[in-house]
Amino acid sequence: PYTGMSYEEATKVRKENLTPALLTYYRKPLMIHQGHMQWLYDHENRRYLDLFGGIVTVSVGHCHPKVNAAAEKQMKKLWHTTNIYMHPTIHEYGQKLAAKMPGNLKVIYFTNSGSEANDLALLMARMHTGVYEAVSLRNAYHGASPYLMGLTAINTWRFNVPSGFGIHQTINPDVFRGPWGGKHCRDSPSQTLRSCDCKEGECKAGDMYYDQLEDVLRFSMPKGRIGAFFAESIQGVGGTVQFPKNYLKRAFEKVKSLGGVCISDEVQTGFARTGTHYWGFQGHDAEPDIVVMAKGIGNGYPLAAVITTPEIAASMSVGKALHFNTFGGNPVASAIGSAVLDVIEEEKIQENAHVVGTYFIEELAKLRDQYEVIGDVRGKGLMIGVELVTDKASCDPLSAEKIGDIWEDMKDNGVLVGKGGLYGNVLRIKPPMCITKEDVDFAVSVFKDAVAKYSL
Ligand code: PMP
């Protein structure tokens, strides 16, 4: 049983002593004190199925025994020295993580958060190319630093401060809300989402979105040169927006042809979450020059990484440009990261994400066909989005009030999901990847009841 600070006391502290800039989920905020695998427990010891995993961060399960044991073992030996010395854990982990990367991506810079990692990736691309200009996609989230506020193109996360000099945006290939459709051309293993007439890799909507990128490059890049192009392989905070299959590969190839560096932000889509591949960009057959990872890499422990080619790393190396990060890749983080990689292999997490995730999408798609307010079900593996609308003809976002009712009702019945998208009307389902089909059946029935009760 829970024996800590009372709920009332914690509420007072939250109000008086903790940042007022912090959003608290739920009308009566949850106080979670314990977790085990896909389950969370509140102060009254009510159990919840966690389908948001600390915002896509808990990859293999809360307090996974093997990850816990690795952390504990390392904590008893050595916590910290900084990387001015060598310690074996970071080398063992670095070798293992590099082996997960395709192609020539084999040089790792460890940091503590996704924002730090994206900042570094942008700096690295600029150092390498000598070009300041960068392009990102609208509706992207890449982090919260002033640099990244420029790359992030969701107004909630942009403020009226100087940020993002030299950063441009192009339209995101949103096949649900965007002007050219293409809903059936997204990269999906789900039968319900695959009824495309286009030939493999030949999506007309994808071509239109790609033309827009070409325009930005043509009109806005000084002397036609670009330093960096950033993209998630499925937009996360933006509401699980999936791109047409032929977009990302062509975009990367074009940017590379202009001498630019392509950065794949795998903070949410990495570590097997999309099921078919270890990295989301592989589902697009795209070849990034830099991959940024965070969140799931540490199963909830602060850890992130930038991985690039030896050629790009040479621009950010001793003698040219030092890079230092006090905690990046510390022994405890490295031990945890290493255990996470092992668990993904040993427990066939990628296969589970594929099988259970595809089943989840199929089950949700059945509800979509039944209920007017479920405008779209999308995603891949255990990276799933459900867009709620007033009706399928207009696709206007469902009111915040109704979404709130559905969301609260799910919580009251033991299921936690996230929310996102520009209009806050996309339910985000990105659970610890150890969930089972039985969990899916439970979650789908809770969701169905909530929709039936509150959507009319
Ligand atoms: N990139 C993506 C795709 C993200 O979703 C996030 C966090 N939501 C970040 C970067 C930033 O990560 P962090 O919060 O660890 O700085």
Image (cartoon, rainbow, N blue to C red):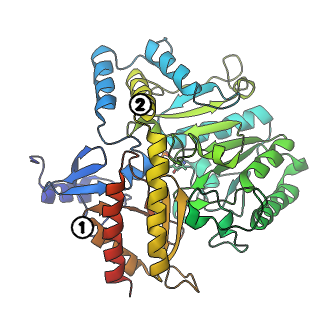
Is residue 266 shown to the viewer in this render? yes
Write the residue at 63% across / 73% down. 177
Disc 1 crowd, CA 10 A, few/some/many (<14, 14-19, 20+): some
Q: Secondary structure at mark 1?
A: loop
Which one is nearer the viewer's eye here, 330 or 220?
A: 330
Is residue 83 shown to the viewer in this render? no
Write the residue at 76% across / 32% down. 128
**Location of residue 78 (image quadrant):** top left
Horizontal and vertical percent position of residue 345: 46, 32
Quadrant for the C terminus in the image: bottom left
Q: Given the current orientation, which residue lies at the most extreme right position?
A: 223
Which one is nearer the viewer's eye here, 274 or 365?
A: 365
Answer left or right for 82 relative to 234.
left
Which label's residue is closer to the chain start, 1 or 2? 2
Q: Is residue 312 above or below residue 365?
A: above
Which one is nearer the viewer's eye here, 57 or 229?
A: 57
Q: Is residue 134 above or below residue 214?
A: above
Horizontal and vertical percent position of residue 67: 34, 30
Horizontal and vertical percent position of residue 434: 37, 45
Residue 346: image tag = 2
Q: Name the amino acid, label 2.
A: Glu
**Location of residue 27 (image quadrant):** bottom left
Q: Secondary structure at mark 2?
A: helix
Residue assigned mark 1: 413
Disc 2 crowd, CA 10 A, few/some/many (<14, 14-19, 20+): few
